Amino acid sequence: MLFIFLYFCLQYIKKLEIQKMKKALVIIALSIFAVSCSKTAEVKEVKTAYVDTSVLMKEYTEAKDLEAKYKGQAEEKGRQLQAEIARFKQDAASFQSQAQANGQAWAQQRGAELQKREQQLGYAQQALSQQLQQESGVEMDSLVSGVKKFIKDYGKKNGYSYIYGTGDAASILYAEEKYDITKDIVKALNDKYKTAPKTEEKAPAKEEAAKK
């Protein structure tokens, strides 16, 4: 009888242990599920988008105005230089027809003068190009910095975790079009530019006047 009693006691204890193990497994499974759900929720909360920077700079009104400004300056400042180049070409053509008639000494002297003028015109072209590049580069750097700051503020205001840039120097190889907010950024930038007070400043001109 004692043996039978002990046998049933052992069976009962095993049954209790199995039930406890089942409960522990259920708790563990629920914990894993809760953690995975939490991670999924965290991933869904990340709001991201991208901007095509090459399109942005083509469609941004301020960038287009800046390009037109320096294109106009290049034409205006280059007009006098082009006139001098045209006169030089006429003189060079006349020199070739007159050299034989006026003798070797005249041809050597006149040829040296034309060569010197050609060098001076080349230096003038180079100086003008460098001046325009430097001035436009300063303004373009300022514009790009302003755009970056605007996008940063836009991202914070609209709850974005990340805003990526695509374009000529992009590192994003693929993104769904629904995440493209380029048009939104362009519109917001152009709206801001339209309402911004226009100043007649020309810092380089002021500096030149001060030097004079």
Image: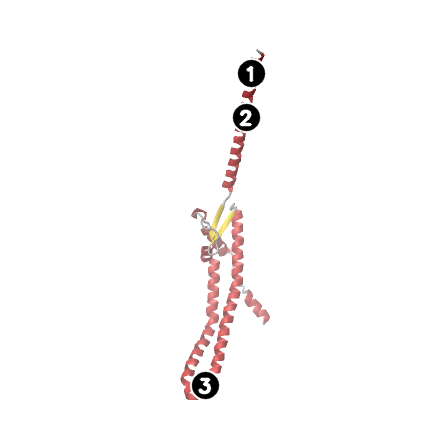
Spatial separation of the CA atoms under disc 3 and disc 1: 131 Å
Q: Which mark is residue 107?
A: 3
Badge 2: few (under 14), some or many (20 or more) residues near its Cα, within 10 Å?
A: few
Residue 74 percent location from the top left of the image: 47, 68
Q: Nearer the viewer, residue 145 or 38?
A: 38
Q: Report the Cα–Cα distance between label 3 and label 2.
A: 112 Å
> On screen, 208 above or below 52?
below
Of labels 1 and 2, earlier in sequence is 1
The residue carrying mark 2 is 21
* Mark 1: secondary structure: helix
Say what secondary structure mark 2 lies in: helix
Amino acid type assigned to the residue bearing label 2 in the image: Met
Q: Position of residue 72 (x, y in %)?
A: 46, 67
The amino acid type found where label 1 is placed reads Tyr
Q: Which mark is residue 7?
A: 1
Q: What number of labels is visible?
A: 3
Few, some or many residues within 10 Å of mark 3 (<14, 14–19, 20+): some
Whichever of callouts 3 and 1 sits on the residue coming sooner in the sequence is: 1
Q: Quadrant of the C terminus?
A: bottom right
For the point 52% across and 58% down, the residue is: 143
Question: What is the three-letter code of the residue carrying label 3?
Answer: Ala
Q: Position of residue 96 (x, y in %)?
A: 41, 83
* Circles 3, 2 touching at the beta carbon (< 8 Å): no
Image position of 37 with respect to 173: above or below? above
